[in-house]
Amino acid sequence: PNPQSPIPNPQSPSWFIWIIYQLKNLFNYLNIKNILIFRMNPKKVYFAGSIRGGRDDAQLYTEIISYIKSKNAIVLTEHIGDNNLLKDEKKLTDKEIYLRDIAWLKECDVVIAECTRPSLGVGYELSFAENIKKEVNVLYRNKECHLSAMIAGDEYFKIFSYKTKDDAFKIIDKILNN
């Protein structure tokens, strides 16, 4: 369609094509070509954090999850930040939790794990994600823990230590902008 042509009737199929063409021209003019693609294809994030290994960081998980969502990403594991998680998960069998989480790992684009609190489950999730070739990012507060050698020594994982929540947010920005 010619940009100078009159606006087609909204009932006609050519109207949709005309609208797309106009949006493309607007984005090119404003030099924001990638915004439409970004908005239509948000990253799917599998956020991992300790559950049965201890819920001391549940509030931090909630804040990290909210931050990830504010960056136009989908967090498949939003429940990790829920303070009632242990109570709610009693409604599911261990097998149901396993199958659900494996499905989410297969679906995600990237794994972000907060590993300050040791967790067998998170370790398993990281290993599984590596085996299916998912990008795996590990965040931890080095003043509060000594990261397991099985994680720190695995060159596949991208390891990030941080001190403050804002430091973690900056790391997450880099991960999501890849």
Image: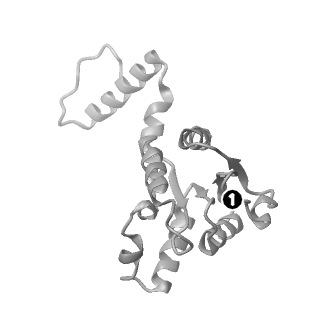
Q: Circle 1 sits on which residue?
A: 145
Q: Position of residue 80 (x, y in %)?
A: 46, 64
Q: Residues within 10 Å of mark 1 (few under 14, many from 20)?
A: few
Specify whether residue 129 is in view: yes
Extreme residue toward the top, this view: 4
Give me the residue at 73% from left, 56% from top: 157
Q: Position of residue 166 (x, y in %)?
A: 54, 38
Relative vertical location of residue 166 with respect to residue 5 in this rendering, above or below: below
In which quadrant will I find the N terminus?
top left
Q: Secondary structure at mark 1?
A: loop
Front-lying residue, 99 or 112: 112
Looking at the picture, the colour scheme in use is one colour
Q: Indicate the quadrant where residue 173 lies.
A: top right
**Three-letter amino acid code at disc 1?**
Cys
Q: Position of residue 47 (x, y in %)?
A: 53, 58
Front-lying residue, 75 or 44: 75
Give me the residue at 35% from left, 18% from top: 2
* Residue 63 left/right relative to 54: left
Q: Position of residue 87 (x, y in %)?
A: 37, 77
* Residue 131 left/right relative to 155: left
Give me the residue at 38% from left, 65% from top: 83
In which quadrant will I find the C terminus?
top right
Q: Indicate the quadrant where residue 172 lies.
A: top right
* Residue 69 left/right relative to 9: right
Front-lying residue, 119 or 174: 119
